Image: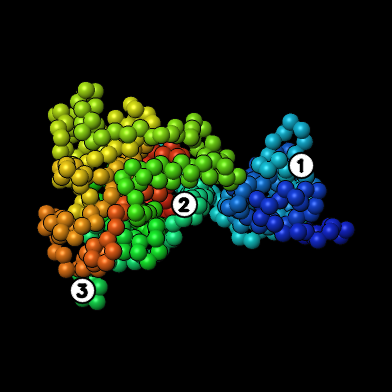
Amino acid sequence: EAAKNLVLKEPADAPAAVESKICALEPLREKRVKVYGWVHRLRNQKGIIFIVLRDGTGYLQAVLTGDVYEKANYEFLTAGPESAIELRGTLKPVPEGKSAPGGHELVVDYYTIVHAAPIGEEAFTNQLNAEADPSVLLDQRHLVIRGETASAVLKVRARALRAVRDTYEALHLTEVTPPCMVQTQVEGGSTLFKLDYYGQPAYLTQSSQLYLEASLPALGDVFCIQESFRAEKSLTRRHLSEYTHVEAELVFLDFETYLQHLEEFICQTVERLLADPVAAPLIKQLNPGFKMPERPFMRLKYADAIKYLNEHNILDGEGKQHKFGDDIAEAAERKMTDQINRPIFLTYFPTELKAFYMKRVPGHPEITESVDVLMPNVGEIVGGSMRIDDMDELLAGYKREGIDPSPYYWFTDQRKYGSAPHGGYGLGLERFLAWLLNRYTVRECCLFPRFTERCKP
Ligand code: 4AD
């Protein structure tokens, strides 16, 4: 009863509290601060309540004693985990030998509960029974992302987007933002999401490549970070229906220079992340064994990969030996990549396996100047190629793939007005993160995953 009626006031002699995000607290040690956040954890023992407060920028340990304890001991009986609160108090470095996030803790002299989350059956912690059907966790993704692991992945994702942009800036590429609603396909008709566009047929974009190609004469080398959409029929750990596609296109270069750029792009981006004070500790937390890939990346021709698979008895989906012209299935590709256990540039795919726009190797029309980047644990994270820059060859490419060239008139026009050798690639951001952070599936590497038949939450 006494606690119920206790009115908590700020100490009369207390200096005004400085409001701060948790990540910016260090310079405020020994000062009185005010922090808002959510109750990540609460432990009540022998007259002290320990709260771990989370505000999205970090975690802060707070201790509540004395009057504050008396009041909180009563109030937190009905305010469960994830309650939104405000804490005020003095920030103290933790004593030698003890540890707390950031190396300090908040000695609380005043708090308010902004919103009390439920206790009991409805309590937050009862909503995430990991032993339940995985689809339960997927339905509860909006709650799962508050967890330490999921939020760490999302934070690294944010830093990765930044690192990608910084790398492209350093390499002199200009960012463009191509449309998502399009009337052309890039990677085959079978994975197109169709939509009704004012009575005309249209699709959600599979790749911004064609728009990047069209941007080259206007802006020079370009890149974009755009959602791509694929109506994939099969459920795998690395396929999403919507994913974040990092794509680049470069002009006036040959295949070798192109591959060197690609290696530089990947390595520079990873180096930036490993030097990033926010990302680096999270990468270490999620994937302690991660090592910077060795350069140069291994080069493996498709034809030699087929030999490798057969020599190592890695069979195709039907239990048969591989032969030239086979689309190497995901399982076989992963097995090979895991055995080799380093980044691989898989090059020179057969023409018949690849899209209409890929440049053929001069003198060898059966193979293309193409590359997939394969990473241990994930497999393909990048696909790209040099592009056909000759008009007649492109028209033949449409024909071979049974594509009506008329909606592509603007793309074809590039071969009319100053055509030049060029190439590009697309990196699946979620696959890159699955590799970097050692996640089992790309579904863990985006905010609210979209995959076969799932469009919620
Ligand atoms: O190999 P893809 O289909 O290549 C293209 O779309 C090219 N037009 C890109 C370009 O040259 N500008 O896709 C490129 C990458 C893949 O390596 C993979 O990382 C990712 O996009 N990707 C997917 N990621 C998640 N879910 C899916 N369903 C994906 N499909 C492709």
Q: In the rendered image, which residue does mark 2 sit on?
A: 171
Q: Element under label 1?
A: strand
Nearest to the observer: residue 176 or residue 327:
176
**Of the image marks 1 and 2, the number of the one nearer the N terminus:** 1
**Of the image marks 3 and 2, the number of the one nearer the N terminus:** 2
Q: In the rendered image, which residue does mark 3 sit on?
A: 200
Q: Is residue 304 visible?
A: yes
Looking at the rendered structure, the kind of residue marked 3 is Gln
Q: 339 above or below 169?
A: above
Please rate how many residues cluster around mark 1, counting C-alpha atoms within 10 Å: few if below 14, some from 14 to 19, many from 20.
Answer: some
164 sits to left or right of 330: right
74 sits to left or right of 333: right
Q: Element under label 3?
A: strand
What is the CA distance from the residue labelled 1 to the residue labelled 3?
Answer: 64 Å
Q: Nearer the viewer, mark 1 or mark 3?
A: 3
Q: 90 above or below 195?
A: above
Quarter of the picture containing the N terminus is bottom right
- Residue at the bottom extreme of this rendering: 198
x and y, in percent, of residue 425 in the image: 33, 50
**Quarter where residue 218 is shown:** bottom left
Q: Nearer the viewer, mark 1 or mark 2?
A: 2
What is the CA distance from the residue labelled 1 to the residue labelled 2?
Answer: 43 Å
x and y, in percent, of residue 309 in the image: 23, 28
Please rate how many residues cluster around mark 2, counting C-alpha atoms within 10 Å: few if below 14, some from 14 to 19, many from 20.
Answer: some
Q: Are marks 3 and 2 in contact (CB under 8 Å)?
A: no
What is the CA distance from the residue labelled 3 to the residue labelled 2?
Answer: 39 Å
Q: In the rendered image, which residue does mark 1 sit on?
A: 93
357 sits to left or right of 380: left
x and y, in percent, of residue 23 in the image: 65, 50
